[in-house]
Every structure is written in C-alpha cells, then in structure tokens.
Image (cartoon, rainbow, N blue to C red):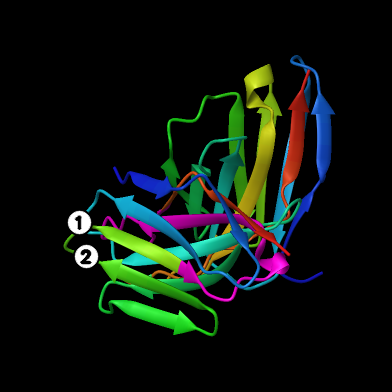
Amino acid sequence: GENVEQHPSTLSVQEGDSAVIKCTYSDSASNYFPWYKQELGKRPQLIIDIRSNVGEKKDQRIAVTLNKTAKHFSLHITETQPEDSAVYFCAANRDRGSTLGRLYFGRGTQLTVWP
Amino acid sequence: ETGVTQTPRHLVMGMTNKKSLKCEQHLGHNAMYWYKQSAKKPLELMFVYNFKEQTENNSVPSRFSPECPNSSHLFLHLHTLQPEDSALYLCASSQEVGTSAFYEQYFGPGTRLTVT
C-alpha cells in the first residue's frame, strides 16, 4: 500500500518568514496530493491540492510543488501569520482503478508562527 | 445544518458498553469514510462506503461495526472497546466520479471517544 512520510513533525517560525513542509510517498501510481490544515479542536480542511500532471500550484501565500520522479511534494507558506498556526497533513491517493480512491495521510506537522 | 455533521461530539464509555457514532452529510456526495485520529499518529482510514456499499475495511477489529443505510448517513457501532481505542473519530464524504478522478474529502468535526 501507500506509505506517506512527512517532515518535520514540528516547525516554529517567526511571523513573516516562510515555512516549508515536505512529504514523500511510495506508490508511483499516486496522482493526487492534497494538503489539509487542522486548527486546534477543529476538523481538517483542504487548503490546496495538486495532481500529477502539474509540477507546481499556487494560491496566494500557499504553494505546493511536486516531483514525481523523486516521489516527493512540498507545501510552501510565505509571509506566515499567527493564524497559520495549525497541524498540516499531506496525503496521497492510491487509485486501484475502482470508482473510489483512497487517501493516505502523513503524520502531520505542527506549525507555530510566533508574532 | 450544512456540510458534514457528527454526533455525539464527545463520548465516554466503559469497555462493556455498546454505543454508536453518527455521521450525516448534506453535500449530496456518494462516498463516506470513517477515520481514526490518535495522538502522534497519522489519520488512519477505517472504512469506505461508496453508494452505500462498503468497499474497504482496513483490517479494523470487529468491535467496530459500520453501517451505511443510505448515501447521506454513516454509523459506527462500538462494543467491548479497549482503552487504546480512545481517539478522535472523523467522518468524511466526497463525490467520486470515474476511475481516475479524485475529489476533496470534507470532514466532520469528529467524535472524541474515551474508553475507560
């Protein structure tokens, strides 16, 4: 099955700095890579995703890059703000060719942005 | 109510109790999921339902029993649980189309379960 590794497990940055979280996956057939943000006591919510036909996707201060050859993808947050503090999860799908895919999640990164 | 709702939000039960968790999605999706979220562990996929049919059971112990009476409702029946089953149980839904498309999963707020 799919194995998703995520690093670092904790990350502290000063407000205004950039934050980068990296994930690797094992299944070369994976073609969908979402990132979820989970604030304390709240549900995970999708913040950005990327499919295997592109190498980079950007949405305001958030960007995701994908290297299919190396099987890794990264989340980049620029100009961090205290409200970016949360646990971030990466995930990769494993499509068996059925009508339903599966998401396998990394262990999460606790990001803390200090004012 | 909009999105994905879960009840109860908190549950404390003894090891000999029987209880059920409920999930309801108001998004018109055709797939629903149960996940277990423990401290310092990744989100663990437990069960997947597509069009009310269970399509995956990730080697979950039989003390967890899912039920999906229709595409909007999902239950997780619990009996004779162990303390290590204490966790946040998250329900999610998505709209699956075709063999290659994969769409965003919308999560419920979760049920915080404590087994004493």
**How far is the residue under mark 1 from the one under mark 2?**
8 Å
**CB of mark 1 within 8 Å of CB of mark 2?**
yes
In the rendered structure, the residue with mark 2 lies on which chain? A
**Is the residue B77 above or below the residue A83 in the image?**
above
Neighbourhood count class around disc 2 (C-alpha, 10 Å): few under 14, some 14–19, many 20 upward: some
Neighbourhood count class around disc 1 (C-alpha, 10 Å): few under 14, some 14–19, many 20 upward: few
Left or right: A18 with respect to B108? left
Residue B96 drawn in magenta: no
In the rendered structure, the residue with mark 1 lies on which chain? A
Which residue is pictured at 50% across the width and 73% down the height? A48
Name the residue that disc number 1 marks. A28
Residue A98 visible here: no
x and y percentages locating residue B56 in the rendered image: 42, 44
**Is the residue B44 above or below the residue A71 in the image?**
above
Is the residue at mark 1 from the same chain as the one at mark 2?
yes
Element at badge 2?
Answer: loop
Left or right: B65 with respect to B95? right
Which quadrant of the view contains residue A14? bottom right
Nearer to us in this view, A105 or A109 = A109
Q: Which residues are magenta?
A: A76-103
Figure quadrant of the C terminus of chain A: bottom right
The residue type indicated by label 1 comes to Ser
Which residue is pictured at 34% across the width and 71% down the height? A65
Which residue is pictured at 35% across the width and 66% down the height? A32
Element at badge 1?
Answer: loop
x and y percentages locating residue B28 in the rendered image: 62, 73
Nearer to us in this view, B21 or A71 = A71
Give whichever of discs 1 and 2 has the lower sequence position. 1
Residue A89 drawn in magenta: yes
The residue type indicated by label 2 comes to Lys
Residue A68 - label: 2
x and y percentages locating residue B112 in the rendered image: 76, 39
